[in-house]
Image (cartoon, rainbow, N blue to C red):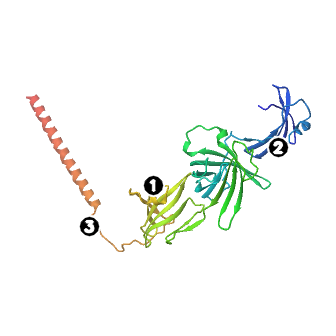
Amino acid sequence: MKGECSETESFDKFLLYDRAYDCYKCMVIHEKHKYVLQYKETYCSLKNSLSSICEEITGDAPLYSMFRKEPSPVPEPCPFHPAPFTFTYNRGSHDCVYPPSRAESCTDDSRLLLRYMACPDVPSTESNVEELVCLASWKEGSTRYLVGQISQVQRRNSIASDEDTYRCFIYKAQHGDKSMSYIIAQSGDATCNGLSSPSDGSRTMKLTTTGSWNITNGSASITHTKKRLVCHSILEQKEKKHIKLVAHVTRGCESGHVCLTFHRRGSSVLELQQGRLWETPQDACSDHQIPPYITLITTSLTPTRCPLIGRYSIINSLADKRRRRQQINIGMLYITLLYIIIFVYSNCSQNITTKNA
């Protein structure tokens, strides 16, 4: 506990009394977001007026951050869109450019999956997958801030402290003719200390949209949109009755490529075969397992004329056979019951005659 509140001024300055050391300190607290408080404070000193003690806070005094934990904050949409992105990152030495890392959206817009790749020629880089949950964002002048919680996807079951998971970011958006990029600086701990610009932080990143690409043979195009399922390439197509394609799909924060085969059965009916999720598009349709058929019908069905026109009489139907079979079974049951009754009656009659004799 910092101390007991002794005096306040202007809703952001507080004079606190430390009973253990019998001294006073000033705290200046600013609400940046409903989930984020930042404050500066003085050293403990003898009793004096609130204004005089607060004047001891200098411009370069440490800035501390507090993030609300209870009740649990409701995540907000991440400001980086439209995903997916490729990105480069720097942890203090050189940019890790190749192989490029990837940032992918989840079905929940408040989550972003960061797939870091290790660059052989850059030290302190490693392959890792992190999930970022965006909790709070605000703006100070032209500087934009974000507070998020990071979890290690490959070590979800491990126990991580708040110091390990909460991070602060400064970011800047850059609009290009055909692409969108973000320059991002990340703090090294659970504060916003040390962040002064988007290009200066414990880790810096540059996210760039991948845009659209055309397949060289003209069979398909790859276009990244905000949708959660995007056509990657068409493998087979027979008129308008059959098509086999590879699609990029996102489920939660898991993404990959699936093989989809559509069979047109009529104007309102489709049958779909959907394969398993694969990381690379080349593997999606190479699976030898035959997936089951899923029947799809349009939501706006309209009555149509029956294909067989005319009046017909049923000569021999399955229902008639069933009825005849049931009648035979019932008849056999009656005959069996009759035999049982006769047998029991005859035995009873013999027993009665023997006793009378």
Q: Eyeballing the image, is 85 above or below 91?
A: below
Q: Are marks 1 and 2 in contact (CB under 8 Å)?
A: no
Say what secondary structure mark 3 lies in.
loop
Q: Which residue is located at x 15 percent, y 42 percent?
A: 342
Q: Pick the quarter of the image with the C terminus.
A: top left
Q: Which mark is residue 60?
A: 2
Q: Amino acid at mark 2?
A: Asp
**Lateral position of residue 356 relative to residue 267, left or right:** left
Residue 59, picture quadrant: top right
Residue 171, picture quadrant: bottom right
Q: Position of residue 131 (x, y in %)?
A: 60, 48
Counting other residues with Cα less than 10 Å from the Cα at mark 2, is it few (<14), some (14-19), or many (20 or more)? few
Residue at which label 1 appears: 276
Q: Amino acid at mark 1?
A: Arg
Q: Amino acid at mark 3?
A: Ile
Q: Position of residue 66 (x, y in %)?
A: 74, 40
Q: Are marks 2 and 3 in contact (CB under 8 Å)?
A: no
Report the Cα–Cα distance between label 2 and label 3. Answer: 99 Å
Report the Cα–Cα distance between label 3 and label 1. Answer: 48 Å
Q: Single out the mark in the foreground, 3 or 1.
A: 1
Residue at which label 3 appears: 315
Counting other residues with Cα less than 10 Å from the Cα at mark 1, is it few (<14), some (14-19), or many (20 or more)? some
Q: Are marks 3 and 1 in contact (CB under 8 Å)?
A: no
